[in-house]
Image: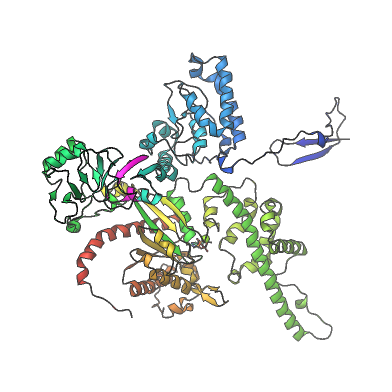
Amino acid sequence: METIMAITANSEYSFAIEYSGPLFSFDIPKASPIEIDKIPVASVATSAPALDSLPVVQPLPLKKRLPDQEQDQNLNFNFSSELKVTDSSFTSDLDEDEDLESSPSVDDGDVEENRTAVVAFGEASSSSAEDTTKRSKKGRCSRCLKGNWFTEKEACLVCDARYCIKCVMRAMGSMPEGRKCIACIGSPIEDSNREKLGKSSRMLKRLFSSLEVEQAMKAEKYCGTNQLRAEDVFVNRQQLTQEEMVLLQSCACPLLRLKPGYYWYDKMSGYWGKEGHKPDKIITANLNVGGNLMQNASNGNTGIIINNREITKDELKMLKWAGVPCAGTPHFWVDPDGSYREEGQNDIKGKLWIKASTRLLCSILSLPVPGKGANRAGEEVNNMLSAAFPNFFEHKTLQKFFLVGSDGSGTSTIFKQAKFLYEPMPFSEDERRSIKQLIQSSIYSYLGILLEGRERFEEESLAAKRNSCVSRKTGSDVSEECDGVTVYSISPRLKAFSDWLLKVMAAGNLEAIFPAATREYAPTVEELWKDAAVQATYSRRRELESLPNAASYFLQKVVDISRVEYEPSDQDILYADGITPANALTCTEFTFPQTASEGSGDDADQQDTLVRYQLIRLPSKGLGENCKWLDMFEDVRIVIFCVSLSDYDEYYEDAFGVPINKMMGSKKLFENIIANQSFEDMEFLLVLNKFDLLEEKIKSSPLTVCDWFDDFHPISSRNPNGDSSEAEKAFYYISFKFKKLFACLSRRKLYVTSTKGLEKESVDSMLRYAREILKWEEVRRPLNNHFSNFETTTTCP
Ligand SMILES: Nc1nc2c(ncn2[C@@H]2O[C@H](COP(=O)(O)OP(=O)(O)OP(=O)(O)O)[C@@H](O)[C@H]2O)c(=O)[nH]1
Ligand SMILES: [Mg+2]
């Protein structure tokens, strides 16, 4: 009898079977025993490679539509498998490729060189950029090294490596930052490529659907890494900070297409130029950026000083043309609108750009003149009445929303929905990997909470049972009811597992054991979840304070989730807890994609796709009156305050163990935020979330359970459409309560909407509503100022 060991190539397991058939006519190869001591080992590394220097390979969710290659299963490769694929595709392509055969420069020697080059590409990601650029100079594809000058190629915006249509997807992956080799993701782009950002090529349009191209181009244009870095720009000899950079690019008259370099900026007039050169722009004045203006900033040699800078000859010509007396090297102060005074004097002598001929001369001499709407100091803004959306699109390219709410109100769900809705790559490959681990290990925490609850409920009901048994026991008779089994009891096998799991959790070892053991225990977890005792416990989940809503969603699919090849779906990510940390700031930046109706809309709609929005989720802890760090955020226009509609009959315990109604907790947070001066000038949008849960809950639990809502007595009407009318009435009533509170505390208008955080469309409408509010307020604000004298004051009830 022979024992044969069979090892399948793709299996994670080896297995042995006993062979009992006829004898073999040939020798069966035998495995020689290995002497472990003789196995050569690598010497100990002196230092570990820096993690961030390792190549990060991105997923490729985009449909692969290479013209003449099969669907490739290895797209989510690691680098070693990429190497294999590359090498084999290289050899197989080699026979077929006509370009290569017809290319006179390629001979056998080249082939060998090419093979080495391809291997080197896979191995050394950091040096690949330089190497591939050199190679692509010959006109060939930097990856397969085929083709010639005339082969259509896509270039990496960082290293300029060029890829043919067959290689571009392998080389650039899912393009989370646009057209960059995988090795270049995270690196800043070549400055000369800035103009190309977001402009798609014919090749991409052939490879991807229009939506995919649009997403990749948006990522390319707006992702942080591709933006100009603040530290590469110096203004008046001072390196810019990120805030200064944003200020320059989002001010009323912003600097577009700024490049790295040294600049000077005259804060008083708004004049801007390259160091050593005459002014070439007029931007918003009085921005707090850069150092002090130097007298020789523009390398002028005329002796005439404007705002402490010696002006150039061209500027002198312009001054003379404008009729400014320049004899005796005078010093002037010039304001943003061109009004000039002699240094130290108050009386304005005239305006520089008032004559059309002066403006004409400026254009001949390539000197800037103030643009329309820029630096309107002194200009009348009274025509606001006739302006539809006056400055919103022209000047505000980045709009910020604060998102805040008490624990469990749904802010992270809304935040994740925004990422799914508007970000081309909401979560990177790395993030998805950690989300997978998070979900796999969370299942055991959920189960732990349930099992603890089960034990408690079992003890309680046993105690109750014992009491009733003792009182009813007659003689030695023990009735069946007194047998120590309750609806919360589980089998001894499951009990053993439960005890072990609770012990591991109590010792804080859960992290160490899971998720490595998830697969092994998944069937037991499933069995436990389906067990009647655990289901009975789950039906009392409101008594298990820390059991998240998502528990049943994940426990139902524990076996599926525990598989090695499990990939969290978008819905899994949406339900998963802990992806956005509760105690830290998180931020996402996006543009609103045009809806079908907007596509045919007016100019304002068209321009709105250019406006970017930042959704900043604030931790609710410590947002009280004295929260100083909020001052860091300038220009936030609106607070989206999230309240869970299902909170009205739920409680949490405060630091002293006193139960607090969660709705009252939200009310308190709302009051604190209104009291904080940092929010004084912001619009407020109250989002009453979890409307779906309210619809369910209100059928069995009256709103009046919450003290604040004790006067909710809607007139009951028979609604033919069924159950939602009570929930709607409750929604209007709660809105009214918050509006009244807000008006009383701030004398302002509160916008309110309801949402279902788990539904994408609902969150999309809510965020678009927030955008509309900003537009309305932009129009209303000047009117409000204008009519402020006529406002009457109201007193709080
Ligand atoms: N049914 C329903 N569940 C929701 C809705 N919005 C959020 N949830 C769930 O409510 C729970 C809490 O939501 P989160 O988004 O985590 O709340 P949070 O504001 O981030 O609160 P913390 O995580 O405690 O900081 C999660 O399990 C969500 O899946 C909704 O509109 N309907
Ligand atoms: Mg959360």
Q: Please say whether residue 155 is visible from this viewpoint.
A: yes
Could you tell me residue 474's position as x and y percent? 80, 86
**Position of 602 compared to 341: left or right?**
right
The residue positioned 61% from the left and 47% from the top of the image is 566
In which quarter of the view is residue 722 placed?
bottom left
Residue 402 inside the magenta-drawn segment:
no
Q: Is residue 638 left or right of residue 252?
A: right
Taking 689 as reference, is 376 above or below it? above
The location of residue 193, given as percent across then percent down, is 39, 35
Q: Taking the image as drawn, is residue 722 in sight? A: no
Where is residue 779, by image quadrant?
bottom left
Quadrant in which the N terminus is drawn:
top right
Could you say which is closer to the camera, residue 215 or residue 490? Answer: 215
Q: Nearer the viewer, residue 633 or 414?
A: 633
In the image, residue 97 sits, relative to residue 404, either above or below, namely above
Magenta extent: 247-264
Residue at x 70%, y 40% (from the top left corner): 11
Question: Residue 346's x, y, as percent?
Answer: 16, 56
Nearest to the observer: residue 512 or residue 68: 512
In the image, residue 685 lies at what x, y percent? 37, 64
Residue 107, quarter of picture: top right
Along the viewing direction, whichever of 648 and 324 lies nearer the viewer: 324
Colour scheme of the picture: rainbow
Q: For the point 28% across and 61% down, which residue is it?
A: 777
| Quadrant including the C terminus | bottom left
